[in-house]
Image (spheres, rainbow, N blue to C red):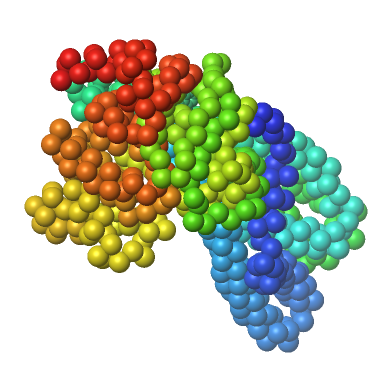
Amino acid sequence: MTKTPQNGVVTQPQTGWDVYLRLLSYVRGHWPMFIVAFAGFALYAGSQTAAAKWLESFIDAVESGNLDQRFWLALAILLIFFVRGIGTLLGNYGFSYVARAVVSRLRCQMFDHLLVLPCSFYQQHTSSELLSKLTYNVEQVTGAATDALKTAVREGLTVLGLFGYMLFLNWKLTLLFVAVAPLVGGVVALASKRLRRLSHGIQDSVGDISASASEAIKGYQVVRVFGGAESERARFNKASERNRRQFMKMVVTQSVTTPIIQMLVAAVVALLTFIAMSPALVASMSTGQFIAFISAASLMAKPIRQLTEINSTVQKGIAAAESFFQLFDEIPEKNSGSVILTDAKGRVEFRDVSFTYPKSESQALKNVSFFIEPGETVALVGRSGSGKSTLAGLLPRFYDVQQGEILLDDRPLSDYTLESLRNQIALVNQHVVLFEGTIAENIAYGALSGASEEAIRAAADAAMVTEFAERLPDGLNTLIGENGLLLSGGQRQRIAIARAILKDAPLLILDEATSALDTESERFIQTALEHVIKDRSTLVIAHRLSTIERADRILVMEQGVVVEQGSHAELLAQGGSYARLYNMQFNQD
Ligand code: ATP
Ligand code: MG
């Protein structure tokens, strides 16, 4: 799984071990708990070995008629189980504690990282894909970090303890186990590689499933009217089927591996039994030792089986962690400026700016030059796709220009810290974004959330939000549902305008801010906006020319180029594209 991130750097495929080590670095800060947990399972493993040793002592005592040991032997059982219980408790609690802490940190780190990734990242990944990472993949890491880790440590230590005891009893016989180890290792390694690849496939398919479902759900009206149900169903079924197949492949891999390894272990135990029962060997060991040895060997079968069984969980976790780390390695938005901008005067200048979207062939803006003096209003007009929104998006630095320079208060935008730059800008997007919550919360969103009730009300009044909010059951405190589902297009737009008014920033960008409004509301808002526009630099984008006639300057754009620049009267007098556009609309109206 080699992905090329937007910066063009190919991330090296990491080995499972690298990923595990990186995951382990998250344990830092939890070392004490980790050690306690480890010690707990060491106690558990020790008690298992002690049980084998107990068997030896018991049989030897019976055989030698040493019956006065019975008190100690009986007490030993209690002690062994007590220690085992304490060990299990410490181990389970400790590892769960650490694992949950790691998982929660991973999840929060992913979210934090999402908040600083550049716009271009969001264009290459769908929201469902990212959501499924946050939910499904996190679960996979949890599985590997909790149950699998517990089993690995507990059973791993048990195997080690039993193995050590067997070495102590008869090291030559025990070396037979060592002979089979590479074989077991080989099988596990092969299976791991395959499991991890399948797991990546499953993660992708889960992403596909949620993407397909979320589109069909969000676009349910279009799906019904345009007869999309069949193709949506086919797409969903395909993703679901792919998911099922990958899972089954995983189950097969898993189900084949475990018996193979068990057969290998059984073969060794069989061979052990055969050799151990040779007269020479039997003579050299006490009956107790002999039985304890064979029991220890067969006691190992269960932990070895469990260890191989968790392999799939571990591989799933590693594959999921890999996908996290890949995301963490994506480079955040460039934020190298150090100047903290406060109270900008609002002088904007574009100097010969050209811009191409990442992964796009053609330039979206070509040699654009213009300026906005503090307090001025500049309007952008031009046909759809001519680059107006692109131009506006460069000011808050959603993208950085490749050529030319954009200055704010006579300094390049990149000199300022991103946060302080964006603090100076209020923006009404072409696509209004609202959040789950009340109207008032949506107006006073984010950094504005401390705004006073009067301020919110004033903004709501100016943007004519009050006009429709009054008729809602709870006024401004009415819940508007996910993305403002319960509102009309024009109502949503008015909330966005109120948000911008409340922000009261020195720089205002209005992208088609009034397009969804009827002529009357538009006129009202126009009056309100004129009020707001007066003492700040404003960039307005609109199709309806009546809303921009009063701008200080109008830029006419065509295919990324500013073809005309001037006031309404000047441009009309020139008789160029603007005059043609104007006459066309004027005649229509
Ligand atoms: P409209 O009036 O329809 O809103 P616009 O003037 O705002 O149009 P832009 O959105 O700036 O147009 O788009 C300018 C050009 O850039 C278009 O050709 C469009 O295809 C392209 N474009 C826009 N967004 C992206 C993007 N994220 N990635 C690649 N190309 C894009
Ligand atoms: Mg646009």
Looking at the image, residue 306 sits to the left or right of residue 186; the answer is left
Q: Could you say which quadrant of the image residue 35 lies in? A: bottom right
Q: Residue at x 29, y 29 (%)?
A: 549
Q: Residue at x 80, y 40 (%)?
A: 182
Q: Could you say which quadrant of the image residue 566 lies in? A: top left
Q: Pick the quarter of the image with the N terminus.
A: top right
Residue 203 image offset from top left, x and y in percent? 51, 36
Asked whether residue 304 appears in the rendered view, the answer is: no
Q: Could you say which quadrant of the image residue 451 lies in? A: bottom left
Q: Is 281 located above or below residue 114 in the figure?
A: below
Residue 563 image offset from top left, x and y in percent? 45, 17
Asked whether residue 528 appears in the rendered view, the answer is: yes
Q: Residue at x 38, y 38 (%)?
A: 377
Viewer-proximal residue among 111 and 305: 111
Within the displayed image, which quadrant is ligand 1 positioned in?
top left
Q: Is 487 located above or below residue 466 in the figure?
A: above
Residue 352 image offset from top left, x and y in percent? 58, 26
Q: Is 218 located above or below residue 56 in the figure?
A: above
Residue 424 image offset from top left, x and y in percent? 47, 51
Viewer-proximal residue among 4 and 106: 4
Viewer-proximal residue among 350 and 171: 350
Q: Pick the quarter of the image with the C terminus.
A: top left
